[in-house]
Image (cartoon, helix red, strand yellow):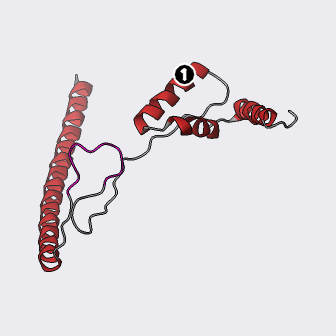
Amino acid sequence: MEAANQRVNGIEVKLHAQSDDLAQLKAMMKEMVTQQISIKQTLQTLVGETSSSQNIRIPQHPASASNQDWIGEGPQSTYRSRRPKRDFPTFEGEEVHKWLYKCNQYFDLEEIPESKKMKLASYYLDGLALYWHRNYTRNLEGHEVT
């Protein structure tokens, strides 16, 4: 019984310590939010001063923008924005159907033109698949296969 009480007390101490840690994190996050609001207000003030004195319009990213590059409207609005690229799957010769499925998913998500799909896919061949592809393309070019 004594061991169980000690164990419960130990758990209560740990919970209290974690509760204190969470309270500290919450306070830190509130401070960060306050700092971010201050920074945002400062930037808005600076942008407002620049815009009014130089007549520059800063474009807002369109809500319905696709993954294509976009160019803002108005004078001096040539900001390009693009979402991060995904990793293309590497193929070494195993599970070809799985690899082809992933390739097609990638092509669709990244809107890769049909004319560039083969070149892109062949770049990510490795191991035996790369060896086969090299020999295949050499054979097509009239070179002797090794």
Residue at (77% x, 33% y) in the render: 140
**Looking at the image, which is closer to me, 95 or 64?**
64
On screen, residue 81 versus residue 144, left or right, reads left
- The quarter of the picture where residue 81 lies is bottom left
- The quarter of the picture where residue 2 lies is top left
Residue at (75% x, 35% y) in the render: 137
Q: Give the range drawn in magenta.
A: 60-70
**Looking at the image, which is closer to me, 54 or 84?**
54
The image shows residue 129, relative to residue 47, as above or below, that is above
- Residue 15: horizontal and vertical position, in percent? 20, 38
Residue at (81% x, 33% y) in the render: 139
Give the amino acid at mark 1.
Lys
- The quarter of the picture where residue 80 lies is bottom left
Q: Main secondary structure of the magenta part?
A: loop
Residue at (58% x, 39% y) in the render: 120
The residue singled out by tag 1 in the image is: 98
On screen, residue 88 versus residue 8, left or right, reads right
**Looking at the image, which is closer to me, 58 or 84?**
58
- Magenta run includes residue 65: yes
